[in-house]
Image: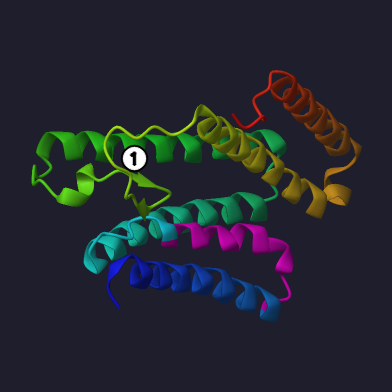
Amino acid sequence: MTGIRGLSIEVGSRAALAIAVPLVVLTVLGRLDLAAYATFGAFTALYGRNEPYRLRLRSVSIAAAGLLVSIGLGIVVASTGATLWITVVALLLITTGGTLVGAVFGLLNNLIGPRRHIPHKTDPYECGLPSEVKQGFRFGISFYLIAMLFILFDIEVIFLYPVAVELRAFGTFALIETIVFIALLAVAFVYVWRRGALSWR
């Protein structure tokens, strides 16, 4: 199949497999509590959809290697019975290392990368979808406002999942922190609501 229809079916199939395979494996292992983390791999099916398979395989493999290294370091820290401060330091090191790797690769690409012009590099897109919008067309500001607010609140709410799974292990302190976190989200939600950011114009 060719065209947008065939491309969408192909990407949709990759996303479905990226969700189904981890869920089946976790079900067999009896660890469905990790499903929220495993299914994040489905997002990789949405990016690079117009890239050649070899280039996409390289990009996803590099990202997978970095993810496995991070998970391995997390397992090592957890298995040693490290204190909270050691865990925080390890998390900061992983975050700093990931940021540096991304920055270095971006810098090297700008300095020594090829300057080939590929039409897809200049194509406008929304969420990886080829755009058919003509030049001069303008989206309403409500589209961007609601999209950004959805991303912000959606990602922040995801952080509640690990606390909910391990609440007994974390204790009362984590419960209080979670209540404060939800209260801050509620205040932010009321603020954007009162400012009219959720009204479609």
Q: State the quadrant of the C terminus.
A: top right
Judge whether 95 appears above or below 1 on screen. Answer: above
Residue 66 appears at what percent x and percent y? Answer: 41, 53
Camera-side residue of 87 and 18: 18
Q: How is the image coloured?
A: rainbow
Identify which amino acid the numbered label 1 is placed on. Val
- For image coordinates 34% across by 35% down, the residue present is 137
Question: Mark 1 highlights which residue?
Answer: 101
Judge whether 134 appears above or below 6 on screen. Answer: above
Residue 129 placement: quadrant: bottom left
Badge 1 crowding class, 10 Å Cα cut-off, few under 14, some 14 to 19, many 20 or more, is few
In terms of secondary structure, where does tag 1 sit?
helix
Judge whether 162 appears above or below 25 on screen. Answer: above
Q: Main secondary structure of the magenta part?
A: helix
- For image coordinates 66% across by 64% down, the residue present is 35
Which residues lie in the magenta part? 29-45
Q: State the quadrant of the N terminus.
A: bottom left
Residue 177 appears at what percent x and percent y? Answer: 82, 32
Q: Is residue 43 magenta?
A: yes
In the picture as drawn, the residue positioned furthest to the bottom comes out as 28
- For image coordinates 42% across by 72% down, the residue present is 9
